């Protein structure tokens, strides 16, 4: 009986770990691949539409002195991968960088 409980616990731990790794990878892929879409001249509207397709993303818009900035990361990667998108005063992408 004790051996069966240990086997079940080990199987549940492995399933939990595999699920966590899958979610982490998918969250990372969303940040990395979407960030690659944001080249100079893309409109802020287009950026926001693309970011809305993400399942695991977290967005913030910290204040800047000129233009706008969006920072995108995922709580599932603990913010390890993040994309910083800087806009000019016309709401066009100035640059985007994966950090």
Image (tube, helix red, strand yellow):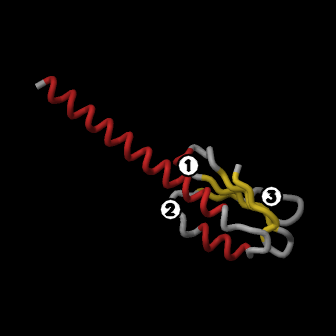
Quarter holding the N terminus? top left
Q: Which residue is mark 3?
A: 63
Give whichever of discs 1 and 2 has the lower sequence position. Answer: 2
Measured as percent of width and height from the top left, residue 64 is found at 84, 58
| Closer to us: 98 or 76 | 98
Which label sits on residue 55? 2
Asked which secondary structure carries label 2, the reply is loop
Q: Which residue is mark 1?
A: 75
User: Relative to residue 31, is residue 11 drawn left or right?
Assistant: left
User: Relative to residue 25, is residue 68 drawn left or right?
Assistant: right
- Residue sitting farthest toward the right: 65
Give the distance between the C-alpha atoms of the residues marked 3 and 1, in whole angstroms.
Answer: 21 Å
Measured as percent of width and height from the top left, residue 40 is found at 79, 69
The residue at 65%/71% (across/down) is 48
Give whichever of discs 3 and 2 has the lower sequence position. Answer: 2
Look at the numbered discs 3 and 1 and tell me whether their residues touch, using CB distance below 8 Å.
Answer: no
């Amino acid at each position: 009986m004790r051996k069966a409980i240990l086997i079940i616990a080990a199987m549940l731990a492995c399933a939990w770990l595999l699920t966590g790794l899958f979610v982490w990878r998918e969250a990372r892929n969303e940040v990395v691949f979407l960030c690659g879409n944001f080249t100079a001249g893309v409109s802020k509207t287009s950026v926001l539409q693309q970011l809305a397709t993400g399942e695991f993303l977290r967005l913030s818009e910290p204040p800047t002195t000129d233009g706008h900035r969006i920072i995108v990361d995922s709580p599932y990667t603990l913010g390890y991968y993040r994309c910083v998108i800087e806009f000019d005063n016309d709401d066009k992408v100035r640059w985007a960088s994966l950090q």
